[in-house]
Image (cartoon, coloured by chain):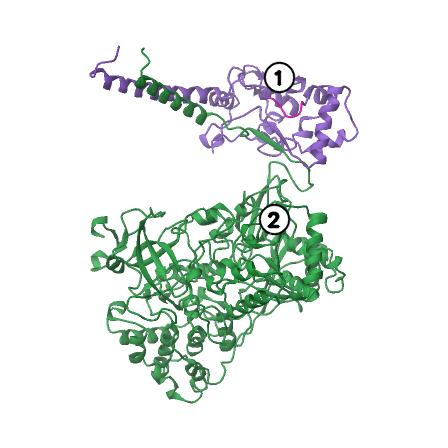
Amino acid sequence: MKLTRRNFLAWAGLGAVGAVACEGFGIRHGELDIQSSVRLPEDLVRGNDNWYASLCRTCPSCEGIVIRVMEGRAKMIQGNPFYPTNQGKIHARCESGLQALYHPDRISSPMRRTGPRESAEFSAISWQPNAMDALRTALQERGRSSVMITEPLRGHMALLVDRFSTAIGAEHLGFEAIDNNTYRAAVNNVFGQDSMPDFDLDNAAFILSFGADFLSTWVSPTRYLRGYGEFRQGDNRDRGMFYQIDSRFSMTAAAADKWLPVRPGWEGHLAMSLAQVIIEENLAAPGVNVDSLTGGDAQALNNFRPETIAPMAGLTAEMTGGDPVKFLKNLARSFAASRPSIAIGGGSAGASSNGLFNLEAIYALNFLVGSVGEEGGVKFNPGSPWDDVPSTSKVGGLEDWARITEQIRSGETKLLLLHGTDPIHGLPDSLQLRDAIIQADDLMVISFSPFLDDTSALADLILPDRVSLEDWGDDITEPGPGYQMIGFQQPVVNPLGDLDPLSFPDVLLTVAQELGKESQLPWANFKNMLREGSDALFELNRGSIEASSAEEFWNNLLKRGGWWDEQSTGPKSVQAPAGLLKTIAGKASSPDFSGIGMDADSFYLVPFSHNTLLDGYNGHLPWLQAAPDPLSTVTWQTWVELNDKTAEQLDVKEGDILRIESSKDSIRAVVYPTPAAPPDVISVPFGQGRQYGSDYATDRPAKESSNVMDILETTRVKDTGSLAWAGTRVRVSKTGESVSISKLEGDVRAVEIGLTPAEDIIKTIAPENA
Amino acid sequence: MMPSRKMLPLMVAGGVVTVIMGFVLVVLLISWFSNPPFGLGNAPPQPIAFPHTVHVAENNIQCEFCHRNVTKGEAATVPAVETCLFCHKDIDGGTVTAQAEIEKVRTAFETDTPINWERVHRLPDHVRFIHEAHIRYFTDDDIPIKYGINGEVLADTPDVALTCTICHGDVGNKTVVKPKTGQSLKMGTCLDCHKDNNVPTDCTVCHK
């Protein structure tokens, strides 16, 4: 055959295909390796799996898990069937604990910064003597002007960190981007309780929820999902009725019998309106002292009549299927009559400037329907079984972070210690914490993170912590199931050979002893501290663990994954403060939307917690990036939900890039039009837009992965100082750019038509008609 | 000579068919030879030269001393490095070569480095072979007549070591481990043996 250009290309192509085929079907190098481990632990039967009980740490609810371990390697995470709060079920987030363990981007050894602070250039150093010496010296020289920022801590870790901070003279604050401080304050003001309550959804007949996405991300979703399952389909009971009042169509709203879109920040007024109807029509539960609730002033709630509130809250006949006033009155009647009924509030309802008023008004409804402390209602949790061990997390609010930023800027804070948090990603950009850290002349930042993130990228020293499957821990569950319970976390595997992390609490204890602080922190390691706690539980001689010796108790405790005592419950009933409704009515105020104002061309911005990434701290875990949002099915990207008609007016379609601009800054996001978005609201998930660290969190361009926190106004919730993250209005504009949206849902959208009884099924619409 | 324009589609079609046929042939060949029926691909290089002859034939160490799980579960398992050190903490080896190999084991233990052995016997991923069940069957005195992998009648009830040889050959007398010469480990072989021994042949007995 003559060698022509055509023949040459043909044969080259064939050769390439052949090579690929042969290589593709070959056995990869290392595929047939059988690794023999080095040690032979006595409890390890090779080839058989072991299951260890522990705790999940990918979200603050700390669910009980069991981990399958084969020959020293963790293989699978499932729910601990004995654990009272999640009862064998887990959130998808828990399963990704394995990815944190085997993550290719884990920091393998201590690192010291080598370049300018914002360069994120580090070089590896050894623990002994370099890293520990640097830590000790920093604490000696700067401890008195230091701040320790950790994830919200409970149990012995909280005790240890508090004592350590006191010993070195540091201020300790917990950090949560979307904190529950307003919810805690409302629970305290209405029910007089420090701990978050439990909701007995299993036995409720009517759930009225305001803003709380409790089936997806709010507080303890796995526990609530179990209760919700019973509520809807439990044996020997009627199917419960569920209304969600929310300015966004969340997963919880999608599960409700009726979703009522409310104008953001007006949830409390609606709750007071329902209370007004219940009182006026004498619908309160038998035995409820209405006079005491209103402070003897029956007119106190007159300003909240449905006729006044319905238009203020943005209710229209389209939303309510008829007269909104009649709808509100009927809702109040159903809620009061379908006992046991329960009112829940949280999420965006507590995240506007009047968030505390909103939540207090919502929770006060429970007194009117007699569900406080009762079956099917709000149940309260007891405190810690240990006198000195905290059972609730201490978390800073926006006011605290503004103060600390100022302290860094002024040079008052000279040492920042970070564990389990990424405040630069989790705080509004306009707070300028990042700039303050970069510009501070004499600031040292030490991070104990096993992964690089936006804040640890600015650290002078990174001391990698172990991940939860490699470390000890405990948790006083919050919210508990209505009785005392404690979960225990044990190391189920050792770190892989190429990693050299050290347990954060062990490092603190070691350095405390080197600094001569044994009197405050006498334990040699964290395991000993936990063992002491276990011995104290054994001495109580009550609860779920039976044992004849402290040693046996410790073993059984770890085997079971925790200790609980169903007899040791919280208060069975709580007296409402006199004149509660009148007091709440006196606090009523409109939500504050300062910034760009209420112009007709602006929208309410209602951000929401990402189903798996939450506030973004899980952004480095690819399973959680790839887990589709339950409603939009979008993965990996930052999307903006806006109404179909709004999209039409803006002349944008799915996949187009929209610029979202507040008075502070602007971001870009991928358009996801949906008929379920209120026309004057746009919603963007928290969680994406990380700048530093693992590629899984950072490798998308800004138009596909942005942090909605960057554009939030720094409005605060009145009386709690928390960030009012649902208190921003924005303008949107087309960018002309477009990307392929990364979603599981097909091109043919599924929407519910239900116009006639015959159409009350899900139908698909061809794209051209959608 | 350049092909005429009429011949071009035919040539393209011929090329496509050739590629597809070649692809199919490659798949078939690889799937056949990946479980070597003729002794192909045996004796892969191991990170440490481990002579079964010295350990089994000369020093009478039982199979299950090292392959601890073989009578207990699905996988026979390779020993932890620490198991080697039970003896080789003190035993240095009689030759320079042996000493060097033993030193590799000690170094692995001291530096906390696992040893990656190369698999010699392999069944496809969709097959579940449970060592424990096979050893329990063959060592059961109450079963009067048993047949080996190639249909041969086993005269007496074998012990564990002899049972291993039914499929693996006389490993104890091999310096370098390789599959039993000429022994097929294909599905037909398994089925024949199960039929000979009158044990279940349902799909799910072996297939996951």
Q: Which chain is green?
A: A
Q: From what the image shows, is residue A536 above or below residue A701?
A: below
- Percent coordinates x, y for residue A695 in the rendering: 48, 45
Magenta highlight: main SS? loop
Q: Tell me: B44 left or right of A243.
A: right
Any part of residue A88 in sight: yes
Q: CA distance from mark 1 to mark 2?
A: 74 Å
The number of numbered badges drawn on the structure is 2
Q: Is residue B61 left or right of residue A425?
A: right
Q: Residue furthest bottom?
A: A296
Query: Which chain's residue wears label 1?
Result: B
Q: Quadrant of the N terminus of chain A?
A: top left
Point out residue A744 in the picture as x, y percentages from the top left corner: 35, 47
What's the mark number on residue A114? 2
Give the amino acid at mark 1: Ala
Answer with left or right where residue A161 lies relative to residue A359. right
Numbered disc 1: secondary structure: loop
- Dividing the picture into quadrants, the one containing residue A297 is bottom left
Q: Chain of mark 2?
A: A
The part of the chain drawn in magenta is: B45-49
Q: Camera-side residue: A466 or A597?
A: A597
Q: Colour of chain B?
A: purple
Choose between A128 and A430: the one closer to the eye.
Answer: A430
Residue A541 covered by magenta stretch: no
Task: Find residue B155 and name its label.
Answer: 1
